[in-house]
Amino acid sequence: MFFISSGGIDRLIIFCGGNLIFYFFYTIFAPHFGHAGRKNIQTGYKEEKDMQQLKERILRDGKCFEGGILKVDNFINHQMDPILMKSMAVEFVRRFASRDINKILTIEASGIAPAIMVGYLLELPVVFAKKKKPSTMENMLATKVFSFTKNNTYDVCVCKDYLQPGDKVLFIDDFLANGNAAKGVMDLVRQSGAELAGMGFLIEKAFQHGGDYLRAQGIHVESLAVIESLDGCRITLKD
Ligand SMILES: O=P(O)(O)OC[C@H]1O[C@H](OP(=O)(O)OP(=O)(O)O)[C@H](O)[C@@H]1O
Ligand SMILES: O=c1[nH]c(=O)c2nc[nH]c2[nH]1
């Protein structure tokens, strides 16, 4: 590699005798390709309407448990696959492209990973509702949510500073089952005076009907994979 300068930095000519310089620039800039901002994101990605990757992964790695629970902790909510997570976030960005959104909202813990990916792509702040009230939190909005997987009711709260009138909120979560978490979030959004722009879920379990309720409320709901049944511990996906 040679650097030949003629007339100062305005004429820097780089000769590259191999792959070294390419490697150098690629290493620095590659992580930013495709993340460059909202406009590029909404138009620049290949559409993956059917989310085939996610469906294949559910069938390959998902494990079914008694009581209608699908365990996806190999790639979504314990160990996480960031590449798949990014593809799913891209798909949310595409599906909610027509919506005016200024904030992403989720509920801890498992919603945080997909929500932050969406917030990153849209360059928007991400707020997560907490399941334990921090002693330092003042000015909070609170509601109760029953957790189907943990068989427990939580006081879910969010600080009023981060959810305000005028906010246009996209709620993102990993699962939609009975819709309890989503209903809790609707209550927090209502209390805050913000507007709910939509709700996006990685996986909807249609047989628990939370989605029917939300859609009947006129909410724009998008689920990337829909499980029709886990009967007999067999995973049946909607096409
Ligand atoms: O539609 P629903 O019946 O409310 O079920 C969906 C909710 O359940 C899961 O949370 P969970 O309570 O298991 O906590 P986690 O986020 O800590 O995994 C999931 O992350 C959703 O928030
Ligand atoms: O990992 C999970 N599997 C599930 O089936 C489920 N339902 C609600 N929340 C859930 N989380």
Image (cartoon, rainbow, N blue to C red):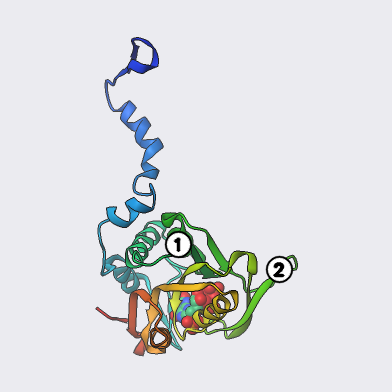
Pick the front one: 70 or 163: 163
Q: Residue at x 46, y 59 (%)?
A: 119
Q: Residues within 10 Å of mark 1 (few under 14, many from 20)?
A: some
For label 2, being within 8 Å of ligand 1 is answered: no
Q: Residues within 10 Å of mark 2 (few under 14, many from 20)?
A: few
Residue 35 place in picture, x, y as percent: 38, 49
Pick the front one: 169 or 94: 169
Q: Residue at x 34, y 48 (%)?
A: 34
Give the labeled residue for mark 1: 80
- 2 vs 1, front mark: 2
Q: Rounded to the nearest whole Å, what is the CA distance between mark 2 and mark 1?
A: 27 Å
Q: Quarter holding the N terminus?
A: top left
Q: Is residue 170 above or below residue 142?
A: above
Q: Amino acid at mark 2?
A: Pro
Q: Is residue 166 above or below residue 226?
A: above
Circle 2/circle 1 CB separation < 8 Å: no
Of the numbered discs 2 and 1, the one sitting upstream in the chain is 1
Residue 163 place in picture, x, y as percent: 58, 68
Image label count: 2
Q: Secondary structure at mark 2?
A: loop
Residue 41 place in picture, x, y as percent: 34, 54
Pick the front one: 226 or 96: 96
Quadrant location of residue 229? bottom left
Give the labeled residue for mark 2: 134
Q: Residue furthest front?
A: 166
Pick the front one: 214 or 225: 214
Q: Amino acid at mark 1?
A: Met
Is residue 177 rendered to the left or right of residue 136? left
Q: Residue at x 50, y 63 (%)?
A: 103
Residue 133 place in picture, x, y as percent: 69, 72
For label 1, being within 8 Å of ligand 1 is answered: no
Q: Residue at x 36, y 75 (%)?
A: 223
